[in-house]
Amino acid sequence: MPIPFLYSDPTYKLLAYVHPNPDTPEEARALILEQLRATYYKLVTTQDKNPAKSGDLAISLSADEAHSMPSLKVLFGLDQLVDVINAELEPEERMGKLALNTQSRNEAERNQFLLITRKLANEMGCCVDIEDLPDEYTLWLYGSRRQIGALMRVLAH
């Protein structure tokens, strides 16, 4: 996931803003948190139910709706999201991850590796995260333990 996203799972009352970079500096984290607070405040205090009039898309919540919403967790990196999800799930339902890596520094080889991994992930219903370091290129596949186990069995043959 190259861009921030919202993760919602009403069954487990999970709501999270996920920033993909686990190494986000503290100053940037503080700015992100402040922007999220301002956006949340704007959403819950907006009384204008006609977005066309205000120019912004506005959501107005009743007191009961606001009270029943899960608190927003702010996470940096997919590993934190996996930890939050796994805390709610039974062991057999938990998320798994698999690292595929190469030490090739060749850009074309890395791009081909990414293309193949994305196709594999798409077929298996998994997500891909990229860790691009000068000496190592790692592609992390995230999915259910069942999916990751099936991938590991296929790759072992």
Image (tube, rainbow, N blue to C red):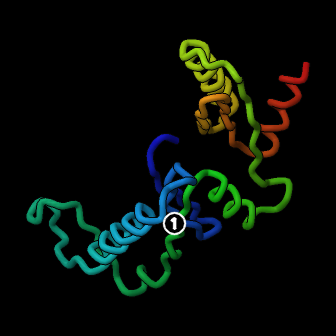
Q: Secondary structure at mark 1?
A: strand
x and y percent of residue 20 in the render?
52, 49
How many marks the image carries: the answer is 1
Image quadrant of residue 155? Answer: top right
> Which residue does the image show at 61% across and 51% down from the upper left?
78
x and y percent of residue 107 in the render?
54, 17
Quarter of the picture holding the C terminus? top right
Give left or right: position of 80 versus 19: right
> Which residue does the image show at 26% across and 74% down from the upper left?
42
> Which residue does the image show at 36% across and 71% down from the upper left?
34
Q: Residue furthest right?
A: 157
Give left or right: position of 84 versus 7: right
* Residue nearest the viewer, comparing 87 with 124: 87
Q: Dot 1 corresponds to which residue?
A: 74
Give left or right: position of 46 versus 130: left
x and y percent of residue 108 in the render?
55, 12
Q: Which amino acid does the dot numbered 1 rest on?
A: Val
Image quadrant of residue 99? Answer: top right
> Which residue does the image show at 35% across and 73% down from the upper left?
40
x and y percent of residue 111 in the render?
56, 18
Give left or right: position of 3 versus 94: left
